[in-house]
Image (spheres, rainbow, N blue to C red):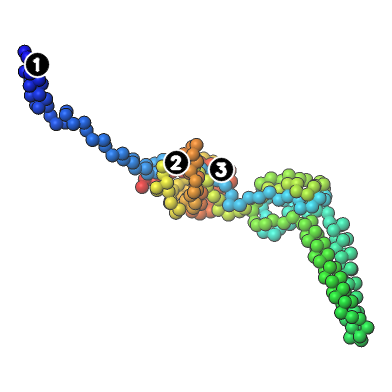
Amino acid sequence: MSFTRLLLLGLAVAGTLPAAAQTPPAPRAASTAPAAAPAGDTIRVLLTPDRETTLASPIPGRIRTLNTSLGSTFGAGQLLIGLECDEPNARLRIAKAELASAVEQLDAKKRMQALQQAGDVEINLAVSAAEKAGAQVALQQAQVSQCSITAPWSGRTAKVHVRSHMSVTAGQPLVDLVKSGPLKLRLNAPSRWLGQLKTGLAFEVAIEETGKRYPARVSAVNSRVDSVSQTVELEATLAGSYPELLPGMSGTAVFPPR
């Protein structure tokens, strides 16, 4: 068979092939998979107080009264710890006496000015002395107030770091407090849920310590995703007040199908 006939035969066979075999398929456009809805998923939840703090000693001193103990309740403004305050009280009395003397001298200067026996300079100096004495009184009153450690809000005592008649230094921790009232829930949800996670989203939380489920709602969604765990932090609030729940309890959150 000649080369010409072979070439013609090859062209005839190629003409019988389907178009799909002759032309490569066009590339498919990339598509984004829809985020999975939080249906039936469960994630860990931790109960935390609405507020908590550690009260420290504002001044050095010795504890005279200790009116709180582990787990005890207290009201807003209640005295929790009283420090010995003899020296600050003595300084306050001195400051008050100096203020009374400065005010008396100012009044005397004003009477002398009325009799043209004192000039404006003397009056101004007397006014400055009275103002300085008044500022000293305010300073000593502030120091005396630091001898009383009061509760910033109503709640319960979580830990007591000191004992009665114990000497403390400035800045030393005294007691840990947690605020009473509804507890907060902290949880980390998968970041792929962000399309469905909104404030006000209702779900249930199963607490292990009580064996019960409680209704809750998402109150805040973090504005940043954890790049390592690919989760986003959430805060939620319980839909009611449950005395059996305590900070530190944990469980799982169950989001309904959406």
Element under label 2?
strand
Which residue carries the number 1 mark?
A: 3
Q: Which of marks 3 and 2 is nearer the N terminus?
A: 2
Could you tell me which quadrant the N terminus lies in? top left
Element under label 3?
loop
Q: Which of marks 2 and 1 is nearer the N terminus?
A: 1
For residue 71, the mark is none
Image quarter for residue 77? bottom right
Residue type at mark 2?
Answer: Pro
Residue 69 in view, yes or no = no
Which residue carries the number 2 mark?
A: 190
User: x, y (%) of residue 179?
Assistant: 62, 53
Element under label 1?
helix
Residue type at mark 1?
Answer: Phe
At label 1, counting other C-alpha atoms closer than 10 Å, the crowd grade (few under 14, some 14-19, many 20 or more) is few
252 or 17: nearer the viewer:
17
User: x, y (%) of residue 160?
Assistant: 72, 46
Nearest to the eye among marks 3 and 2: give it: 2
Which residue carries the number 3 mark?
A: 249
Whether tag 2 and tag 1 are in contact, CB under 8 A, the answer is no
Residue type at mark 3?
Answer: Met
Relative to residue 227, is residue 84 drawn left or right? right
